[in-house]
Image (cartoon, grey):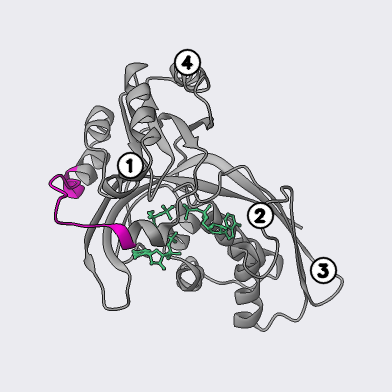
Amino acid sequence: MQTIQGLAKINLTLDILGKREDGFHEVAMVMQSVALSDTLILQVAKDSDIHLAIDVPWLAADASNLAWRAADLMRQTYGIKDGVEIQLTKRIPVAAGLAGGSADAAAVLRGMNQLFALGASDEELCALGAKLGSDIPFTLLGGTMLATGRGEKLERLPDMPTADIVLAKPHVSVSTAWAYKSYDAAPVTSHPQTDQMKRAIIDKDDKRIASLLSNVLESVTMKKYGIISELKEKMLQYGARASLMSGSGPTVFGIAEDGAHAQHIAEALRQLPAVDVFVTKTAKSMRK
Ligand SMILES: C[C@@](CO)(OP(=O)(O)O)[C@H](O)COP(=O)(O)OP(=O)(O)OC[C@H]1O[C@@H](n2ccc(N)nc2=O)[C@H](O)[C@@H]1O
Ligand SMILES: Nc1ncnc2c1ncn2[C@@H]1O[C@H](COP(=O)(O)OP(=O)(O)O)[C@@H](O)[C@H]1O
């Protein structure tokens, strides 16, 4: 039996550099794991099927689920005859900009590699993960990374100094494909300073990291959902060092001074209707 945590991510920066011929967008993003996680328990099944059980009824536990698809890909790639039972406990909000589905897929890739003693390297697992989704290689390795290409090319950065993070997810779901499709570069005047963010992380300069948070997809998702700007403002009003929308949204994260301050911000945000609030921390790389 293998028990694996699939960690959520936030985007410290997200820049879109252009549209590619394969329909994807060329990006440059500094990605950061956070401790908020889903739990996946994997066991060899008695038969030769994939069995996925999820603790929530509203997420399809069938062949459309990224955890199921990751198991299928592993079985096909490595010619595994046995089936696998996957128990998924979902804590990361869905379609939130936190890569929850990617984290689950990554956990299945890693979990099956161990369960069936396949000996696949991180590089092999990342290449398989990239077939299922652009964010999966990052969620396989975690920590602090610069992601380029369509998000699958990774450059490891030193772990950023541990920070207390508040996540606020309004009750709307955002499709990543919709956000990229709706992006219009023309009116976007402010882009992330990716190289400066890298430098701030290397220098472990947490104040500068906070001052450089930037995401061009805010121009798409914030325009449609006013609650996102409200959440950002509220976080700042309650003293967050900085706040930003993660990925394609709608989750907003704020960097707090310490754990008690994060709880204080979270309490204020919980007064708002239709928002789920989580207190977490940045998480260090799982691989060294
Ligand atoms: C925006 C980001 C930022 O980290 O995260 P989320 O908001 O999804 O968490 C990622 O780029 C999301 O990565 P991921 O969720 O794995 O996307 P994929 O499944 O590969 O792609 C979903 C769809 O988004 C679009 N897409 C994705 C990545 C990319 N670089 N360019 C794109 O245009 C494509 O239309 C694609 O069909
Ligand atoms: N295991 C999974 N957990 C969450 N969402 C999943 C999963 N498998 C498939 N999905 C689908 O993937 C889409 C994106 O979900 P998610 O990864 O949570 O968000 P995001 O792309 O914003 O980070 C959702 O529409 C959801 O239905």
| Mark 4, secondary structure of its residue | helix
Residue that label 1 marks: 222
State the residue in front, 283 or 224: 224
Q: Are marks 4 and 3 in contact (CB under 8 Å)?
A: no
Residue 241 x, y percent position in the rendering: 30, 24
N-terminal label among 4 and 3: 3
Q: Give the quarter of the image for residue 60.
A: bottom right
**Which tag is nearer the camera, tag 4 or tag 2?**
2
Residue that label 2 marks: 59
Tell which quarter ligand 2 is in: bottom right
Q: Residue at x 32, y 74 (%)?
A: 23
Residue 154 visible in image: no
**Relative to 111, is 234 above or below?**
above
Residue 244 x, y percent position in the rendering: 33, 36
Q: Amino acid at mark 3?
A: Ala
Residue that label 3 marks: 45
Q: Which mark is residue 264?
A: 4
**Which tag is nearer the camera, tag 2 or tag 3?**
2
N-terminal label among 2 and 1: 2
**Relative to 26, is 15 above or below?**
above
Q: Residue at x 59, y 81 (%)?
A: 77
- Label 2, ligand 2: CB separation under 8 Å: yes
